[in-house]
Amino acid sequence: MHIGVLEDDEDQRALIGLWLGAAGHTHRDFGTIADLLEALKRERYDLLLLDWMLPDGNSDQVLQWVRGHLGWEVAVVVITARDEEAGVVQALQAGADDYVVKPPKQHELLARLTAAARRARPGNLPVLRLGAYEVDIQRHTLSLEGSPVTLTQKEFDLAVYLFQSPGKLLSRDHLLNKIWGLNTDVDTRTVDTHVSRLRKKLALDGTRGWKMSPVYGYGYRLDRIDAPAAEGA
């Protein structure tokens, strides 16, 4: 991947660059929001890795520009020193695909970057297998315990994105923009309707290993549910 790195700390920037290079990625480094925004007008990146707090602002400015001008094809991962839930939610609400808490760990960071890029371009992962579920992205089919489930195109697109984002807080606005597009004329109630249908069609109530949970006032989260231990085990 070609990755744009926004980080004002030179030592941290050099370390991340070393990790990216060792993993086979190319990258270009930026120390200010202004420099990155100028570069985004001329150069294409597969993924952006953004420090949340910069001397000339915070990265929600970058996220707003990226989502407004480039859409959702560019994956964005935020590095934040704030590990409290409010800070994480703020980054996700601004349009981030994922977040990493400082100080980043090499292998975790690289894994999260790969996963975020894969979610942004789902065609790169033709088959998803998650316990009782199998999703063939190229053939647009989804099966539960070997039996095909009939889904509309939007239901299928939403299911793919949710299964590629396990455990992540996903806002209604984020899902609306990701699945229906930036210029859609539908509202977030459409998201609620489709999530409700998926929960019923796919048994996302925990009985098949996955549970769709509403997050009050925000959106949804799909979690893996471990089977309860047998008595006497």
Image (cartoon, rainbow, N blue to C red):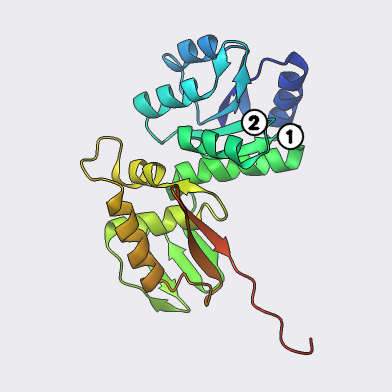
Q: Which mark is residue 79?
A: 2
> What is the three-letter code of the residue carrying label 1?
Pro
Q: Please report the residue visible at 35 percent of the width from the left and 26 percent of the height from the top.
A: 68
Q: Is residue 28 visible?
A: no
The quarter of the image holding the C terminus is bottom right
Q: Please report the residue visible at 46 percent of the width from the left and 10 percent of the height from the top.
A: 38
Alpha carbons under labels 2 and 1: distance apart: 8 Å
Answer above or below: position of 140 versus 181: below
Q: Residues within 10 Å of mark 1 (few under 14, many from 20)?
A: some
SS of the residue under disc 1 = loop
Whether label 2 touches label 1, CB < 8 Å: yes
Q: Which mark is residue 192?
A: none
> What is the three-letter code of the residue carrying label 2?
Ile
As rendered, which of 50 and 39 lies closer to the eye? 50
As rendered, which of 161 and 45 lies closer to the eye? 161
With 182 as the anchor, is 122 left or right in this view? Answer: right
Q: Residues within 10 Å of mark 2 (few under 14, many from 20)?
A: many
Q: Position of residue 170 (x, y in %)?
A: 47, 47
Kindly give the residue lying farthest to the left in the view shown.
Answer: 185
SS of the residue under disc 2 = strand
User: Residue tagged by mark 1?
Assistant: 104
With 114 as the anchor, is 62 left or right in this view? Answer: left
Q: Position of residue 93 (x, y in %)?
A: 47, 37
Q: Position of residue 143 (x, y in %)?
A: 42, 72
